[in-house]
Image: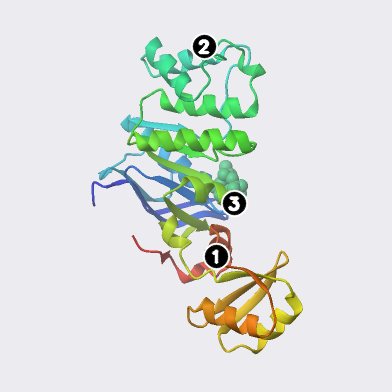
Amino acid sequence: MSADIALALRGVTKRYGRTHALTGLDLAVDSGCIYGLLGPNGAGKSTALRILLGLVRPHSGTVEVWGRAVGRDGILQTGAVGAMVEKPAFYEYFSGWRNLTMSAALSGRVVPAEIEAVLKRVRLWGRHKDKVGAYSHGMRQRLGIAQALIPRPRLLVLDEPAQGLDPQGLAEVRDLLRELCADGMTILLSSHLLHEVELICDHVGIIAGGRLVAQGPVAQMISGDGGYELRVDDQARALSVISASELVARHAVENGAIRVWLREDGPEQLNSALVSAGVGVRALIPRRPALEEVYLDIAGADTASGTEDIGQ
Ligand SMILES: Nc1ncnc2c1ncn2[C@@H]1O[C@H](COP(=O)(O)OP(=O)(O)OP(=O)(O)O)[C@@H](O)[C@H]1O
Ligand SMILES: [Mg+2]
């Protein structure tokens, strides 16, 4: 196994009674990247994270961290791994500072300068003496990430870090994760916020029905033919030109704009055809498919057909 792969799950299976939470899950997370585990509710994302952290035992399969098999206790026992799974729990009447100090004490190592650095990193320095009970949801999420950073991990595992955050909170968490990644940390996060994954993650794995149905670099996942968005002065006339045109493979009307997929790439020919028919073309914009479209296509497809690898 390559040392460039930080974390791998191989053939991991987990059942809860008759519920098959995971069925032979294979997952590979490259070192130094932000990997997003995407999937609908109940897909098995949290179960996968709990298994690799040793919080839940799988029925079969293995977990490897930087090429070394991890024992039954999961990767938290290997050191160098920080995690935030589920809603982080804190002592409400104690300050953020005191909560972090207590959690550092549990790991046997309290270094005030490091706690200060972590609080500054998550931008809670200045509010660190306030009681956690008075923190906003976004501040609690950031304190949860701070807690996960206390062991100075090389690998950070976060279950739904963007959950419930407002746009400002999302941007703060996004910036923080990007900074940590730039410093060489590997991050595995789960989410069902497609747009966030598209913005934050380098790689994405799509899990549905307990199986990985696709994984690859986000840039490659969304590089397919998204067609062109067409804005015109006379939509009815444009649609009749498009319907009759041999240039157009298919078209759709979305949010008041026409989207066309061409048989061969030649938007200037479509432009001339429209202009010749008296249609004023205001814009003809190449579109990439959003991760949402890729996701809906893949997660909605028959998962029994196996994993679609989008390449490296
Ligand atoms: N402790 C448990 N006991 C019984 N069933 C469970 C337990 N934990 C998870 N499951 C079941 O396993 C399946 C996968 O759940 P999991 O929580 O891993 O999904 P998820 O992808 O994290 O979903 P969500 O997006 O809602 O967080 C679901 O059918 C769930 O009901
Ligand atoms: Mg979950």
In percent of the image, x 64 and y 80: which residue is there? 275
Q: Compare marks 3 and 1 and give the one earlier in the sequence.
A: 3
Q: Amino acid at mark 3?
A: Gly
Q: State which tag comes first along the sequence, 1 or 2.
A: 2
- Residue that appears at 54% across and 65% down: 287
Compute the Cα span from label 3 to label 1: 31 Å
Q: Amino acid at mark 2?
A: Arg
Task: Evaluate whether residue 89 shows in this view.
Answer: yes
Q: Residue at x 62, y 13 (%)?
A: 131
- Disc 3 residue: CB within 8 Å of ligand 1: yes
SS class, disc 3 = loop
Q: Which of the two marks, 2 or 3, is nearer to us in this view?
A: 2
Asked which secondary structure carries label 2, the reply is helix
Which percent across, then down, holds residue 18? 57, 55
Query: Mark 2 highlights which residue?
Result: 98
Neighbour tally class for label 2: few under 14, some 14-19, many 20 plus, Cα within 10 Å: some
Circle on res. 287: 1
Calculate the distance from the C-alpha at mark 2 to the C-alpha at mark 3. Answer: 35 Å
Q: Which quarter of the rendered image does ligand 2 occupy?
A: top right
Q: Secondary structure at mark 1?
A: loop
